[in-house]
């Protein structure tokens, strides 16, 4: 492959948003190039059962779903490249993007779909029980805790919303927060305090997640008081970590407008970023819904918007390339 390659549309990211954008762009004859990054398939490759992606009456496996999306994107004509974009320059046109392996892409439209990553506490026991009772997504995994006891860690909007959501499934929900005040909006706090299934433990941090060895399944949690250091344990079936997400946008800093948390700002109702011709889809621009189906939906929007954008530029991209 030459070191410099032109493409009509460059898609950065291989999650539901990136693959869906690729399927629509390829079917619109835009011959997209999709660069996968380090996690081909995205966040769903680190989960097991997916029960809320439309079209499947039985639970499906996250990695399987993503393999299907990749196969569909390739089948309709996407060039899928296993590489990582390390630098972009949106100040020149065609846009320029360079990969870890030294390849440079000149792109007439770019779709950013680099997703987000849940923040974790960083405890070894948290990693050990991931998928065995430790989760960062109540909407995804709450269903598995019907009639069980769970805890939510965090004090922001996400933690409170997750706790409220979990009351639809779990018999008891304990919110554990490291301070004595929640960061969440007042209205959410009111709902939280009014819910008889929810109790709150203030001023405690998680010292360790407890569980069995084989299989590795959560049985409880060890907490430590923030100032006294006094420890206590709780019996639990599940622990939901809700201490925030980090959008994967470091390489776009200074290139497109982002909010104070690093999420790419898009014009409401569209996937347009602050740079005409650069679109953003999926979790990288969405801190509210963060679902595979919404990521796929905005991936579709980005491809359709890229097609319209390319149709308006005053020269034929093929000739320019
Ligand atoms: P992601 O899936 O985050 O994909 C981002 C992609 O960008 C990756 O391929 C990555 O390699 C790539 N990338 C990043 N940086 C670069 C770079 N520099 N160059 C090139 N590529 C790059 N949602 C549901 O609807 N149902 C569920 O059951 C469900 N379960 C979940 C379980 C877990 C454990 C987690 C963590 C999430 C779950 N979600 C679920 C949420 C869902 O996975 C996300 O909303 C969705 O994956 C977001 O898709 P995305 O395409 O925006 O980004
Ligand atoms: P957030 O507002 O940053 O809150 C994170 C929470 O986790 C804070 O309470 C923080 O504690 C706690 N925390 C952080 N690191 C921790 C650690 N290592 N150990 C223990 N606790 C830790 O994140 P978010 O709740 O995910 O919300 C992110 C953004 O999305 C916010 O702007 C939020 O308003 C928005 N959002 C909006 C809605 C909505 O409008 N309905 C829903 C969800 C999210 P401290 O308080 O002590 O810092």
Image: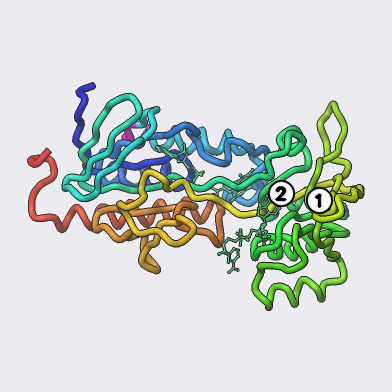
Is residue 76 a member of the stretch shown in magenta? yes
**Label annotation for residue 145:** 1
Task: State the image coordinates of residue 244 (x, y, percent, origin top left).
Answer: 61, 54
Q: Which residues are magenta?
A: 74-79
Tell me if residue 152 can be seen: yes
Q: At x 44% / y 44%, what residue is drawn?
A: 114
Identify the residue under disc 2: 141
Q: What residue occupies the far top of the structure in this picture?
A: 1
| Ligand 2 quadrant in view | bottom right
Q: Which quadrant, please, contains the N terminus?
A: top left
Q: At x 8% / y 55%, what residue is drawn?
A: 314
Give left or right: position of 270 versus 71: left
**Label annotation for residue 27:** none
Tell me whether the residue at label 2 lies in contact with that at label 1, contact meaning CB atoms closer than 8 angstroms.
yes
Give left or right: position of 152 versus 213: left
Q: Which quadrant, please, contains the C terminus?
A: top left
Q: Secondary structure at mark 2?
A: helix
Task: State the image coordinates of residue 156 (x, y, percent, origin top left).
Answer: 66, 63
Q: Quadrant of residue 11?
A: top left
Q: At x 36% / y 31%, what residue is drawn?
A: 80
Relative vertical location of residue 252 with respect to residue 46 in this rendering, above or below: below
Alpha carbon of mark 2 to alpha carbon of mark 1: how far?
8 Å
Q: Return the residue nearer the eye: 224 or 297.
A: 224
Cβ at disc 2 under 8 Å from ligand 1: yes
Q: Quadrant of residue 217?
A: top right
């Amino acid at each position: 492959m030459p070191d410099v390659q032109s493409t009509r549309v460059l898609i950065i990211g291989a999650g539901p948003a990136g693959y869906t954008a690729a399927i629509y762009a390829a079917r619109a004859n835009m011959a997209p190039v999709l660069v996968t990054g380090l996690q081909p398939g995205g966040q769903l490759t680190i989960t097991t059962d997916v029960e809320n992606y439309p079209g499947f009456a039985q639970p499906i496996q996250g990695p399987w779903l993503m393999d299907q999306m990749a196969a569909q994107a390739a089948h309709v004509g996407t060039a899928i490249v296993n590489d990582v974009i390390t630098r972009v320059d949106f100040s020149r046109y065609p846009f320029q993007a360079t990969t870890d392996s030294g390849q440079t892409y000149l792109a007439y439209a770019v779709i950013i779909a680099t997703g987000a990553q849940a923040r974790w506490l960083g405890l070894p026991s948290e990693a050990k029980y991931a998928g065995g009772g430790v989760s960062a997504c109540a909407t995804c995994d709450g269903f598995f805790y019907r009639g069980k006891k769970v805890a939510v860690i965090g004090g922001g909007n996400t933690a409170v919303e997750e706790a409220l959501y979990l009351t639809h499934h779990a018999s008891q929900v304990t919110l554990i927060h490291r301070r004595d005040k929640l960061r969440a909006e007042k209205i959410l706090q009111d709902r939280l305090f009014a819910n008889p299934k929810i109790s709150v433990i203030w001023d405690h941090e998680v010292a360790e997640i407890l569980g069995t060895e084989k299989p590795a399944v959560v049985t409880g949690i060890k907490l430590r008081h923030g100032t006294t250091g006094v420890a206590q344990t709780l019996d639990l079936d599940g622990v939901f970590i809700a201490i925030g997400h980090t959008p994967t946008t470091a390489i776009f800093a200074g290139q497109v407008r982002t909010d104070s948390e690093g999420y790419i700002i898009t014009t409401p109702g569209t996937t347009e970023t602050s740079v005409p011709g650069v679109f953003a889809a999926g979790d990288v621009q969405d801190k509210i819904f963060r679902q595979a189906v919404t990521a796929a939906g905005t991936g579709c929007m980005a491809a359709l918007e890229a097609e319209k954008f390319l149709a308006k530029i005053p020269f034929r991209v093929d000739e320019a390339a």
